[in-house]
Image (cartoon, rainbow, N blue to C red):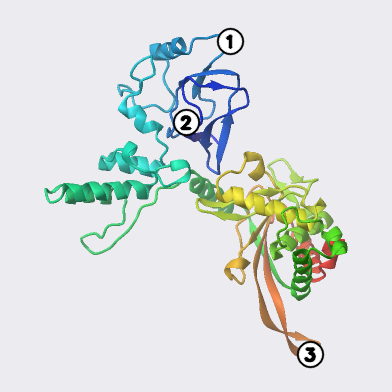
Amino acid sequence: MSEGNILRWLKQEGEAVERGEALLEIETDKAVVEAVAPARGILGKILAAGGSEGVKVDSVVGLIAVDGEDPVALAGAVLAGATPAGSAPAGAATVATAAGEASPAEVQRRIPASPLARRLARETGVDLAAVRGRGPHGRVLRADVESAARQAAAAAAPGGAAPLLAATVAAAGTAVPSAAGAAFEDIPHSAMRRVIAQRLGEAKRTVPHFYLSLDCAVDALLALRAQINAQLDAQVGAQVGAQVGAHPDGGKLSVNDFIVKAVALALRRVPGCNAAWTEAAVRRFAEVDIAVAVATPGGLITPIVRHADDKSLGSLSAEIRALAGRAREGRLKPEEYQGGGFTLSNLGMYGIREFAAIINPPQACILAVGACEQRPVVRDGSLAVATLMSCTLSVDHRVVDGAQAAEFLAEFRRLIENPLAILV
């Protein structure tokens, strides 16, 4: 990460702050994180207002008056020569007086709004202060600005302002039919989308992928899962509960929970696939940390389940659900999505039969899991019906050879088709 956006300040100038207290929210390419106050004192001056974009790492974004320092004098010193990070271009009125009165331009910057909503407001002349935000914590979204623009256009009709405003909104990217009848919408790239494009584009260009696929029979696993969940529902089955570990929040186990545990145990027995590529060496990880792909409104993110091989199914299930929830809310901490030695991507819940995933560098492997579905199979020379789950392992050939990858898949299938082995 080289830069981020200041989403909003949780404290205002002149307010007392404690060391370690949440001070502001920073929007990174993956999540929204809270920055804490490095010292106790008075928030004397905010240099990068809420809504500031592209603020470089290590920039000074605010000043805290400590040990009897005068916050007003501190603000005056800033006005005398400091350049606020992320402020408007030179010459723009950013701070009106040392007493802290903000200009209209600064008021606009302090209103929490998405970058697209802020740009659209500038281009359409919409006052963000008059727009009711419907996003998280009252954040103004593009749709809020569009609605305000339409209302302003309707109020201006029939004097000719409405067509002009509509044309301005269209130029800003709103889907409006062109003269030829086509309609489109340009959605600006988010920081997360840019990182996804950069990393996965690099992976497909530079990593020599190869793919291994197999089908796992999951009838026994589905039956065991149903039995365990029924006993959890009835709050009986203490013996089974002791084996799988009591589920902390009383939730049911999912098929994905069994898959994560099976992957973790297979990696412990075939550690060559729990590895990453570096220019100097192949890095083999001593701990089994699995990245689980989660779809969010902003794009794909992979929170990490640490020490997955040592955790019970119940603990894994609760942790995965908690991580996925925070991922969708954009509240993951950096340490919760950085690292990991192996990635799991499961699209079975969408009915996808099989697919091949792109490796997440520098990891060497990613397992793509499809849906559990009944298919005809031949057993002992006779036609039968079984519930199969197709899995495809994408492998970095620089790190893992075909035989080792096949060994991992075989061990994974053995665990899935004999699910009691997952509980031992």
Residue 273 seen in this snapshot: no
Residue 55 - label: 2
Question: Hey, what amino acid is under mark 3?
Answer: Gly
Tell me the tag on residue 67: 1
Secondary structure under tag 2 reads strand
Q: Can you say which quadrant of the picture contains the C terminus?
A: bottom right
At label 1, counting other C-alpha atoms closer than 10 Å, the crowd grade (few under 14, some 14-19, many 20 or more) is few
The number of callouts visible is: 3
| x, y percent for residue 126 | 28, 41
Q: Earlier in the sequence, mark 2 or mark 3?
A: 2
- Helix, strand or loop for disc 1: loop
Nearer the observer: mark 2 or 3; the answer is 2
Residue name at image x 66 percent, y 64 percent: 211
Q: Pointer 3: what residue? A: 381
Q: Residue at x 67, y 81 (%)?
A: 375
Residue 149 placement (x, y as % from top left): 27, 47
Is residue 29 positioned above or below 48 on the image?
below
Q: Earlier in the sequence, mark 2 or mark 1?
A: 2
Look at the numbered discs 2 and 3 and tell me whether their residues touch, using CB distance below 8 Å: no
